[in-house]
Image (cartoon, helix red, strand yellow):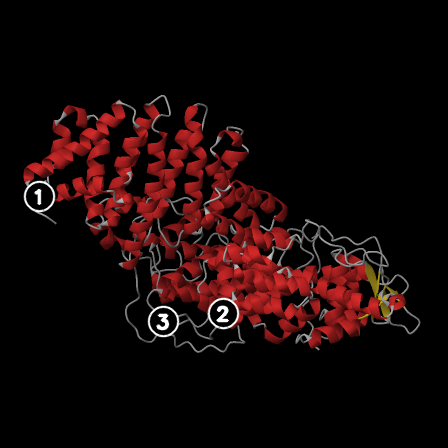
């Protein structure tokens, strides 16, 4: 397996074409436990839990025989017909806008919780090449559709989950799977930012939460895949950056818990990952944030974050800035209102946006004799609004 | 190995089987335990193990004699386990042991008293040790390691058998600790939560009824969990309990406890003496302590870098990193004290520029904005009393106790 994908570090690395398998073109590594279990007489095929891709406890029933899919389309014919009958077609799947007609070029298999492998037939599972092209189709949709983003996200969110389900059922664990998971992580990270920007949506919080939850599931599986491959070869080119995403998620206050604290998570990582630039960067950012060293936090973020890292972090910046405002408010001198211009420089935010943030947090702003905007300190009305804060990007100077 | 005759082999095996049955009928837990302690490699176990390689048909032997046959479900796999272990086939040994242990547990459930508790302890210990060996073997031949996970499931079964009213409860803490060891090793530490809940909140147990030795182990593990979750007050209580009640001669255990207790104590402002670090060989904390005493941030950073791997492995790295704030406090206090000596009337005005100079002198690259940030957070977290005049670039300290000590409480969040 070669590591020849020379993706420049600064870019969130999506190549313009679909990801290609490594040029060494050995057939994909697919661990086949069927052969293994013949040697191990005590566990039958039917009682093996998928040891790797078990991301959804609901989807993985303990009874697993690894199927090899034969479905040629993005959606199995049986499901297409059923959903046409039930008029259960997404706006993207409708042929000429007809809610009861679809085609093999438009319909994409839905995520379905319930089935055990015993009930599924091979013709309902998509093999790897089909999954690859399905993912490509979905990613293209994200780029080109003119539907509102939440609608696109909802569709792609579900359909990529179904792709992951098919990967799990066939126990596909090779380079191609890694590529696909990386793509999906990227989708969730970019969605993370785009969703956060839709500040006015009322169900935003739950949308964001669900998206983050899937992001974490994808990351968890991706890490397992990296682990498997590490036995035989060196680090993947982007591996460190993906681990750094998991760390950076902890900048946000309300992320779904993955079961253990960061301290415990670090214990499991290899030294080469922990000492990578991306990990050092993210661990340091966490340190600055927790310490309250906003000056360094923002300068370091601006200097070193990759596009994807920035995408991930930007929705969290408002909370961090709000904290900074509260510290300034608390520790300042009563008779000297704090200049917003200076604070906006340090917090890498536009002055008008900073003003908005102060107001949203219940703080008044005033103007001094020279016409400069200021924040009177020692106000007692500071509070974080329940509905969340507006998201402002990183303003570079 | 000396030549073993068929007759001698037969004798050794029946001897083992008889001892087992005798132990059960006379409720002799000690003997029973010795027969189950596979990985202890007692000579008394090696003997029948060797015999099994000569006398191949032990199953038939078990089934033909009535007093052995009643325990066939235990004894047949147990013999297989002995044999596999002796041959170094640990994965096979584990599988066989799990079968035997399951059957034994069934019997144990039927016995009314807790006479066999010691044997159950051995079962709990052995299942873990054998699983660890088995997984090592599997890993080195590139296969999936899942035996330890299986051991965890079995331990939960034992735990279930012990939980409830009755004299068997006394063993629950020991088994809980075995579970902790398994979960920590597997990295699935979050699974400890349900065990802890059963012990602490289910009101089935009164912690006082357990042997002190088990309580120490329990407090050690739960204390560690509190450290990872940064609940320092609780962590302090638990780990201190473990330390105080640890057997005086168990130096290695004390060291393990201290490894986690020291960062906790540091976080609440209590510094260990040098001799303690030396005695227990925990010198990796030496520079951290010095940095806190002198306010030398550079020293703290260096200590963290030097022992980074060790601190990350034990999981205390993030806890130690947070000590930075206390180091800053110490430094500011030093500046304040020096200023007071020079000119008491002006001491409470700390120019931000002075802080910057001090930090630069220590080799830390810092500017006015950053220094102001740090001062703001020191004030916010009550490590400094006063306010900042941004306009005049000065921190005005409170005239009374401007740098309050932590006094056993963690930094406010």
Q: Residue at x 46, y 70 (%)?
A: A238
Q: Position of residue A373 (x, y in %)?
A: 85, 69
Q: Quadrant of residue B392?
A: bottom right
Is mark 3 in CB contact (under 8 Å) with mark 2? no
Q: Residue at x 26, y 27 (%)?
A: B23
Q: Are marks 2 and 1 on the same chain?
A: no
Name the chain letter of the residue that bears numbered label 2. Answer: A
SS for callout 3: loop
Write down the residue under mark 1: B4
Q: Residue at x 56, y 52 (%)?
A: A210
Q: Earlier in the sequence, mark 3 or mark 2?
A: 3
| B287 in relation to B188, above or below | below
Q: Are marks 3 and 1 on the same chain?
A: no
Write down the residue under mark 2: A275
- Residue closer to the observer: B398 or A281: B398
Q: Position of residue A172 (x, y in %)?
A: 34, 59
Q: Are marks 3 and 2 on the same chain?
A: yes
Is mark 3 in CB contact (under 8 Å) with mark 1? no
Instruction: Tell me the distance, in whole angstroms, between the alpha carbons under discs 3 and 2.
Output: 28 Å
| A109 in relation to A174, above or below | above
SS for callout 2: loop
Q: Which mark is residue B361?
A: none
Judge the density around disc 3: few (<14), some (14-19), many (≥20) Cα neighbours within 10 Å: some
Q: Residue at x 21, y 30 (%)?
A: B19
Q: Which mark is residue A21?
A: 3
Horizontal side of B385 relative to B176 (left or right) equals right
Q: Position of residue A142 (x, y in %)?
A: 53, 65
Horizontal side of B55 relative to B33 (left or right) equals left
């Amino acid at each position: 397996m070669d590591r020849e994908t020379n993706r420049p570090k600064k870019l969130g690395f999506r190549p313009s074409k679909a990801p290609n398998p490594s040029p060494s073109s050995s057939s994909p590594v697919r661990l086949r436990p069927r052969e293994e279990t013949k040697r191990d007489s005590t566990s039958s095929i039917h009682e093996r839990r998928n040891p790797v891709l078990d991301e959804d406890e609901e989807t993985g029933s303990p009874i697993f025989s690894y199927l090899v899919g034969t479905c040629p389309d993005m959606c199995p014919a049986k499901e297409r017909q059923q959903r046409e009958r039930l008029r259960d077609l997404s706006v993207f799947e409708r042929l000429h806008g007809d809610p009861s007609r679809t085609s093999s070029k438009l319909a994409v298999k839905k995520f379905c919780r319930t089935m055990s492998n015993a009930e599924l037939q091979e013709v309902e599972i998509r093999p790897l090449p089909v999954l690859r092209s399905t993912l490509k189709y979905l990613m293209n949709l994200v780029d080109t559709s003119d539907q509102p983003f939440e609608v696109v996200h909802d569709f792609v969110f579900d359909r990529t989950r179904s792709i992951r389900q098919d990967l799990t059922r066939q126990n596909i664990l090779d380079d191609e799977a890694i590529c696909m998971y990386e793509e999906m992580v990227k989708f969730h990270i970019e969605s993370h930012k785009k969703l956060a920007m839709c500040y006015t949506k009322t169900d935003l919080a739950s949308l964001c939460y669900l998206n983050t939850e899937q992001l974490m599931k994808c990351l968890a599986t991706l890490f397992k895949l990296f682990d498997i491959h590490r036995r035989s070869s060196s680090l993947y080119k982007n591996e460190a950056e993906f681990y750094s995403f998991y760390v950076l998620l902890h900048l946000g206050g309300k992320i779904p818990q993955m079961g253990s604290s960061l301290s415990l998570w670090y214990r499991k990582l290899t030294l080469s990952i922990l000492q990578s630039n991306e990990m050092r960067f993210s661990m340091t950012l966490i340190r600055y944030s927790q310490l309250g060293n906003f000056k360094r936090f923002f300068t370091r973020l601006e200097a070193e974050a990759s596009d994807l890292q920035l995408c991930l972090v930007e929705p969290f910046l408002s909370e961090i800035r709000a904290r900074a405002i509260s510290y300034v408010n608390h520790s300042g001198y009563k008779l000297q209102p704090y200049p917003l211009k200076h604070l906006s420089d340090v917090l890498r935010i536009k002055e008008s946006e900073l003003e908005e943030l102060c107001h949203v947090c219940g703080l008044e702003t005033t103007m001094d004799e020279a016409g400069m905007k200021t924040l009177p300190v020692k106000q007692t009305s500071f509070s974080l609004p329940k509905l969340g804060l507006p998201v402002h990007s990183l303003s570079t100077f | 190995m000396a030549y073993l005759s068929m007759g001698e082999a037969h004798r050794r095996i029946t001897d083992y089987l008889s001892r087992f049955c005798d132990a059960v009928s006379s409720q002799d837990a000690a003997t029973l335990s010795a027969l189950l302690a596979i990985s202890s490699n007692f000579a008394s176990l090696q003997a029948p193990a060797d015999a099994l390689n000569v006398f191949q048909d032990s199953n038939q032997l078990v089934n033909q004699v009535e007093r052995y046959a009643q325990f066939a479900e235990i004894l047949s796999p147990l013999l297989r386990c002995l044999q596999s272990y002796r041959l170094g086939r640990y994965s096979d040994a584990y599988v066989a042991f799990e079968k035997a242990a399951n059957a034994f547990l069934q019997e144990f459930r039927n016995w009314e008293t807790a006479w066999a508790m010691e044997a159950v302890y051995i079962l709990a210990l052995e299942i873990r040790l054998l699983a660890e060996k088995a997984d090592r073997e599997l890993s080195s031949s590139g296969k999936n390691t899942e035996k330890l996970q299986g051991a965890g499931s079995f331990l939960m079964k034992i735990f279930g058998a012990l939980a409830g009213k009755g004299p068997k409860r006394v063993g629950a803490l020991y088994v809980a600790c075995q579970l902790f060891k398994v979960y920590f090793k597997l990295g699935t530490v979050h699974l400890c939560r349900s065990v802890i809940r059963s012990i602490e909140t289910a009101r089935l147990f009164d912690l006082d009824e357990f042997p002190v030795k088990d309580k120490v182990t329990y407090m050690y593990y739960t204390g560690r969990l509190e450290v990872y979750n940064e609940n320092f007050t609780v962590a302090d209580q638990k780990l201190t309990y473990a330390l105080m009640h640890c057997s005086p001669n168990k130096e290695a255990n004390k060291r393990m406890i201290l490894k986690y207790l020291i960062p906790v104590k540091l976080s609440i402002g209590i510094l260990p003496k040098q001799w303690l670090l030396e005695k227990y060989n925990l010198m990796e904390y030496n520079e951290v302590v010095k940095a806190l005493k002198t306010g030398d941030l550079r020293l703290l950073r260096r200590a963290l870098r030097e022992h980074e791997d060790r601190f990350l492995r034990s999981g205390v790295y993030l806890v130690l990193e947070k000590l930075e704030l206390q180091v800053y406090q110490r430094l500011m206090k030093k500046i304040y004290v020096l200023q007071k000596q020079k000119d008491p009337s002006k001491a409470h005005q700390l120019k931000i520029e002075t802080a910057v100079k001090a930090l630069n002198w220590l080799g830390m690259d810092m500017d006015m904005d950053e220094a102001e940030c740090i001062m703001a957070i020191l004030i916010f977290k009550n490590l400094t009393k006063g306010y900042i005049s941004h306009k005049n670039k000065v921190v005005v300290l409170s005239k009374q106790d401007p740098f309050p000590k932590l006094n056993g409480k963690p930094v406010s969040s």
